[in-house]
């Protein structure tokens, strides 16, 4: 499966963006999926994920209540709605997918994922 992330940009603090991750090559309906980010000089970190079955979601503490993951199976697309953005959210955001996961588990480590998108830059100005 190929993943294409888009939707990044420059936004002021307090603003919103919606990232998209379009999957091609195979339907992602049975894939666990996640969003990760990497800021300059920092390691990649888990942002949020959704389970392969049951649409369970889980987020890192710093984005809980501000970010929401959703899917559109008809469009084979994963979304990350980001509200109340903060300068600390500035990073390159990556989507990832894997068919290898327990049915209702949300995978929080990058090594658990098999497929990655190319990343989209999100910059939040103060």
Image (cartoon, helix red, strand yellow):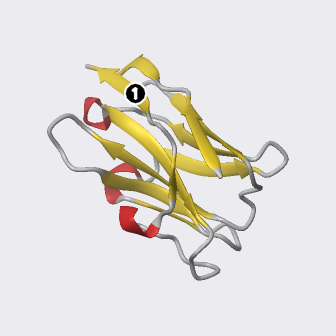
Seen at 44% across and 69% down, the residue is 112
Which quarter of the rendering shows the C terminus?
A: top left
Seen at 70% across and 50% down, the residue is 71
29 in relation to 101, above or below:
above
Q: Is residue 83 left or right of residue 20?
A: left
Pinpoint residue 75: horizontal percent, then vertical percent.
80, 42
Q: How many residues crowd mark 1 within 10 Å: few (<14), some (14–19), many (20+)?
A: many
Pinpoint residue 66: horizontal percent, then vertical percent.
46, 44
| Closer to us: 42 or 126 | 42
Q: Is residue 49 left or right of residue 74?
A: left
User: Would you say residue 109 is visible in this rendering?
Assistant: no
Seen at 55% across and 77% down, the residue is 105
| Closer to us: 49 or 125 | 49
**Secondary structure under the numbered disc 1 in the rendered image:** strand
40 in relation to 74, above or below:
above
Q: Quadrant of residue 20?
A: top right
User: Would you say residue 59 is visible in this rendering?
Assistant: yes
Seen at 71% across and 58% down, the residue is 28
19 in relation to 36, above or below:
above
| Closer to us: 115 or 66 | 115
The total number of labels drawn is 1
Q: Quadrant of residue 7?
A: top right
In the current view of this chain or complex, which residue is farthest to the right?
Answer: 74
Pinpoint residue 125: horizontal percent, then vertical percent.
29, 18
Q: Is residue 32 left or right of residue 107?
A: right
In the current view of this chain or complex, which residue is farthest to the bottom?
Answer: 102
| Closer to us: 15 or 47 | 47
Q: Is residue 30 left or right of residue 107?
A: right
Task: Say which residue label 1 marks.
Answer: 121
Pinpoint residue 122: horizontal percent, then vertical percent.
39, 28
Q: Quadrant of residue 21?
A: top right
């Amino acid at each position: 499966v190929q993943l294409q992330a888009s939707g990044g940009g420059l936004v002021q603090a307090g603003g919103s963006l919606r990232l998209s991750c379009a999957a091609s090559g195979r339907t992602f309906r049975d894939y666990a999926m996640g969003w990760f980010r990497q800021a300059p000089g920092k390691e990649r970190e888990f942002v949020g994920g959704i389970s392969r079955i049951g649409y369970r979601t889980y987020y890192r503490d710093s984005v809980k209540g501000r970010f929401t993951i959703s899917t559109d199976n008809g469009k084979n697309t994963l979304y990350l709605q980001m509200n109340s953005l903060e300068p600390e959210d500035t990073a390159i955001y990556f989507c990832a997918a894997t068919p290898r996961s327990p049915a209702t588990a949300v995978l929080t480590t990058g090594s658990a994922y098999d497929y990655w998108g190319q990343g989209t830059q999100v910059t939040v100005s103060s």
